Image (tube, rainbow, N blue to C red):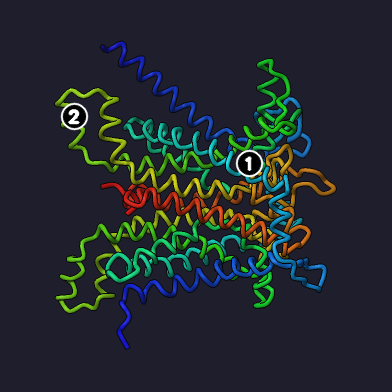
């Protein structure tokens, strides 16, 4: 009995280690490539530990192209889109969770339908529309589109959280003389917050890394984003500029990891999409 | 006038926003698809269904539709079981489980384009670490970039690396928030671990599983990023999104691209409706 327990524990530890190595290897390779020289990064056989680690690339990408702008644009689009998605997604979720009206199901499923829409199918008309409204090459345009793409997921996740919070809680506050909005702000919203934080984190990651819209709808340092910049180091007369791409990918990971650490307490309660009963 | 229901009132701005930015472009596409229309040529000409006939008879279109479905199926078939397995593995309490749970979530946070490029660095012949392992183990060079099956394997590896964690962390969150009582009861009754898993655990996390699965399948049908940078659509790996990008946006052919977009849109709409209707009772 004891012996089989020990051996099953060993198998267990081995499995966990395999998962961790599999997950960390590409990240390790990215970060070390950022520290290697231009020659070492393409050396054969590959070097597992950088022989002469250099931080030059981390500085160079800051100067040789407007990467600080691209970085800032990515962060702005990420924040803007999350605000838009929350501002439009939460009222719809609350309205559909708390009130019954004719066509409520249709409203919810119509919103969900937009999650299925492939960006590639709308990018051309959006380019033309954006040109008409002078939105091409603006962070606002990206924020609007990323926000819109994420409204369905916010609405549906928040809907399931709002449904689980008893309406009586709000009503008892209203009896005490608070308005419906005050009751929402003081009772329902804090209870649904872990869910909101968790899903916002996913939305931020989606927006920060989006490539297709950004590659077509932005054209200059005014609005171009980090993923587009990474792709631009590929090909061209210098071939694949692995070091620069590795550095920018590493830089791109930093803000999201910080956010992840800030919100990780909410993740366990929040990421079940309110669907565990 | 009858007063509008407050619930509907709260949903209207959201609906209008979505319709304006995402449905209006679709109508635009329908209009465009019936015309000969490129951005280089100011003369727009009505040609009826000709673009649609061209698209449907194009081998590239059919291949890309196949590739999209193929990748959706293989990636989903790998990611869901693997993600569930990892979630079960990390739902046990042991020393260091906290840090392990953080580590497995990191791939989701990587910029997808960067991820794909770094996998290219790992797999380029005479350059990548995986090629080196393969050589050391005596398999020689793996032809990831010239063969449909191996190129597809690479796409699968990239997507599974980045998105299996999505299943894993969501299912993990579901597993650790399950109530303890049914498990204690099962223990008293002497149920085997397998019985406990299939009769208690799986049914309780089923709604979460359905929701992430639907989200993931529909995202997989839009798969484009790894194709853009890793295979560039070569070896038959071009998906529908990448196909539109090549035939429509690069030559600025609004008409033909519109026709592809309309067909793609209809396909997604039908599929989404089937999925949503099938699982309607679960996701509500």
Residue A238 horizontal/vertical position (percent):
83, 46
Q: Could you tell me if residue B114 is visible in this image?
A: no
Query: Pointer 2: what residue?
Result: B186
Residue closest to the eye, B7 or A158: B7
Query: Pointer 1: what residue?
Result: B67
For marks 1 and 2 on the same chain, the one whose residue lies earlier in the sequence = 1
Q: How crowded is mark 2: few (under 14 residues within 10 Å), some or many (20 or more)?
A: some
Residue A28 horizontal/vertical position (percent):
59, 36
Alpha-carbon span between mark 1 and mark 2: 45 Å
Tell me the quarter of the picture where residue A55 sits. Answer: top right
Residue A23 horizontal/vertical position (percent):
52, 35
Q: Does B234 appear above or below A16?
A: below
Residue at 27% from the left image edge and 25% from the top image edge: B193
Residue closest to the eye, A255 or B128: B128
Tell me the quarter of the picture where residue B84 sits. Answer: top left
Q: In which quarter of the image is the N terminus of chain A?
A: top left
């Amino acid at each position: 009995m004891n012996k089989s327990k020990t051996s099953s524990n060993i198998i267990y530890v081995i499995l966990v280690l395999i998962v961790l190595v599999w997950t960390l290897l590409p990240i390790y390779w990215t970060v070390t490539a950022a520290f290697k020289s231009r020659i070492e990064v393409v050396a054969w056989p590959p070097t597992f530990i950088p022989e002469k680690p250099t931080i030059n690339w981390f500085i160079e990408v800051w100067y040789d192209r407007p990467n600080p702008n691209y970085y800032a644009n990515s962060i702005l689009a990420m924040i803007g889109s999350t605000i838009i998605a929350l501002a439009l997604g939460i009222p719809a979720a609350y309205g559909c969770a708390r009130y019954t009206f004719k066509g409520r199901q249709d409203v919810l499923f119509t919103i969900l339908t937009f999650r299925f829409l492939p960006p590639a199918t709308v990018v051309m008309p959006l380019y033309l529309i954006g040109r008409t409204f002078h939105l091409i090459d603006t962070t606002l345009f990206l924020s609007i589109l990323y926000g819109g793409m994420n409204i369905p997921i916010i609405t549906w996740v928040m809907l399931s959280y709002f449904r689980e919070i008893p309406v009586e809680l709000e009503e008892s506050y209203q009896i005490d003389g608070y308005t419906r909005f005050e009751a929402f702000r003081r009772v329902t919203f804090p209870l649904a917050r872990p869910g909101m934080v968790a899903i916002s984190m996913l939305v931020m990651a989606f927006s920060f890394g989006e490539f297709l819209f950004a590659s077509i709808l932005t054209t200059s340092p005014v609005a171009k984003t980090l993923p587009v910049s990474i792709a631009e180091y590929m090909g061209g007369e210098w071939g694949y500029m692995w070091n620069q791409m590795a550095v920018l990918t590493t830089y791109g990971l930093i803000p999201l990891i910080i956010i992840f650490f800030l919100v990780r307490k909410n993740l366990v309660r929040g990421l079940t999409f309110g669907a565990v009963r | 006038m009858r007063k509008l229901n407050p619930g509907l009132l709260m949903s209207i701005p959201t609906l209008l926003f979505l319709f304006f930015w995402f449905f209006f472009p679709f109508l635009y596409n329908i209009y465009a698809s019936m015309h000969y229309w490129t951005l280089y040529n100011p003369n727009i000409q009505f040609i009826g269904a000709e673009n649609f006939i061209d698209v449907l008879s194009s081998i590239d279109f059919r291949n890309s539709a196949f590739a999209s479905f193929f990748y959706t199926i293989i990636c989903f078939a790998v990611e869901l079981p693997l993600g569930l397995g990892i979630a079960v593995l990390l739902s046990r309490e042991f020393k260091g489980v906290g840090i392990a749970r953080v580590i497995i979530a990191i791939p989701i946070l990587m910029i997808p384009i960067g991820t794909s490029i770094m996998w290219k660095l790992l797999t380029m012949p005479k350059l990548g670490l995986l090629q080196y392992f393969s050589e050391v183990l005596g398999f020689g060079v793996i032809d990831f970039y010239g063969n449909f099956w191996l190129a597809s394997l690479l796409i699968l590896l990239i997507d599974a690396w980045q998105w299996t964690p999505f299943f894993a962390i969501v299912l993990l969150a579901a597993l650790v928030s399950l109530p303890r009582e049914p498990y204690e009861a099962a223990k008293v009754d002497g149920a085997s671990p397998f019985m406990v898993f299939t009769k208690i655990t799986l049914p309780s996390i089923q709604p979460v599983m359905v929701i992430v699965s639907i989200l993931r399948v529909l995202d997989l049908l839009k798969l484009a990023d790894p194709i853009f940078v890793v295979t560039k659509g070569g070896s038959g790996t071009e998906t529908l999104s990448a196909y539109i990008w090549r035939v429509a946006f690069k030559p600025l052919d609004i008409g033909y691209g519109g026709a592809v977009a309309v067909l793609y849109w209809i396909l997604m709409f039908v599929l989404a409706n089937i999925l949503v209707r099938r699982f309607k009772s679960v996701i509500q």
